[in-house]
């Protein structure tokens, strides 16, 4: 998942974040100047794969691409967020505030806010996983020794703390608490994996893929979870 990005103009702020863990999603959150929270004003959002179209005023909104968002600002900002489900490719987003005028034509009052998002291909993602695995397998011996030394020092500090606090703790109770924590961590980890696996198997990409690619997707997901588990175990 990428970091959140803020895109804004004088009266509109759009916060976007691309999540490609399983099914690519663009998470969108918006903030609009209060003077537009009145009857008649709408926030419109468009997505295109061919470009922004135009940032000039036009009644031909189809130039901006497909309409993905239409919010009646007169009803308040109860749910200022949505998710846009997309596939691999490059996308152009446009958002602005408008209001109907004479002859029923819509007039733009604020914006546009425009930005791009790119969903990398499955091959690229698998290559990144392979590179990560290669980097982990070729760590220099000096770095490995330094990590081991740091671990030994940490363990020694842990033992000293344990001896210092021993008079104030019950070893059997501490052991039982630690075992319970470990069981809960394993259960939470397994549950996260099963949930992500179920989401993957229900996605259109997985269902439409040949068996070999389905297996590759599942292997990639398993490897991602193993990396997360390694991160969780780091002090």
Image (cartoon, helix red, strand yellow):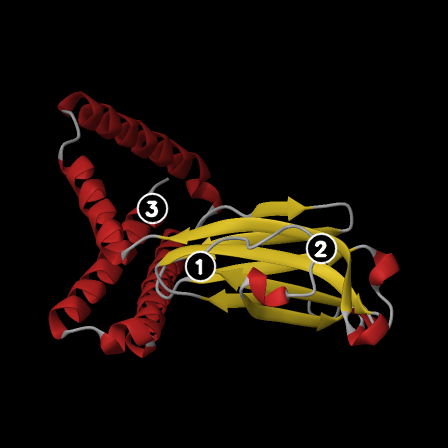
Q: Position of residue 127 (x, y in %)?
A: 20, 47
Residue 73 located left or right of residue 213? right
Residue denoted by label 3: 231
Residue at the image position 15 percent from the left and 74 percent from the top = 210
Q: Nearer the viewer, residue 88 or 215?
A: 88
Q: Between disc 3 and disc 2, whose residue precedes?
A: 2
Q: Between disc 3 and disc 1, whose residue precedes?
A: 1
Q: Position of residue 200 (x, y in %)?
A: 31, 71
Residue denoted by label 2: 57
Separation of marks 3 and 2 at Cα, in angstroms: 49 Å
Tag on residue 49?
A: 1
Image quarter of residue 60: bottom right
Separation of marks 3 and 1 at Cα, in angstroms: 36 Å
Foreground disc of the pair 1, 2: 2
Residue at the image position 62 percent from the left and 46 percent from the top = 6
At label 3, counting other C-alpha atoms closer than 10 Å, the crowd grade (few under 14, some 14-19, many 20 or more) is few
């Amino acid at each position: 998942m990428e970091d959140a990005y803020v895109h804004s103009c004088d009266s509109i702020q759009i916060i976007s974040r691309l999540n490609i863990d399983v099914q690519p999603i663009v998470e969108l959150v918006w903030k609009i100047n209060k003077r537009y929270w009145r009857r008649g004003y709408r926030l419109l959002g468009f997505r295109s794969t061919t470009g922004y179209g135009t940032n000039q005023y036009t009644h031909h909104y189809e130039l901006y691409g497909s309409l993905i968002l239409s919010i009646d600002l007169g009803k308040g900002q109860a749910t200022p967020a949505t998710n846009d489900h997309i596939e691999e490719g490059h996308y152009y987003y446009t958002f602005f505030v408008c209001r109907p005028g004479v002859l029923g034509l819509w007039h733009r009052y604020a914006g546009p806010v425009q930005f791009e998002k790119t969903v990398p291909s499955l091959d690229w993602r698998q290559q990144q996983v392979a590179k990560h695995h290669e980097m982990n397998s070729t760590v220099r011996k000096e770095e490995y020794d330094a990590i081991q030394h740091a671990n030994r020092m940490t363990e020694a500090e842990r033992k000293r703390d344990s001896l210092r606090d021993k008079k104030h703790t019950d070893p059997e109770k501490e052991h039982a608490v630690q075992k319970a924590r470990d069981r809960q961590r394993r259960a939470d980890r397994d549950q996260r994996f099963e949930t992500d696996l179920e989401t993957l198997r229900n996605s259109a990409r997985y269902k439409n893929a040949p068996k070999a690619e389905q297996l590759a997707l599942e292997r990639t997901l398993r490897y991602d979870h193993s990396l997360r588990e390694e991160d969780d175990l780091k002090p």
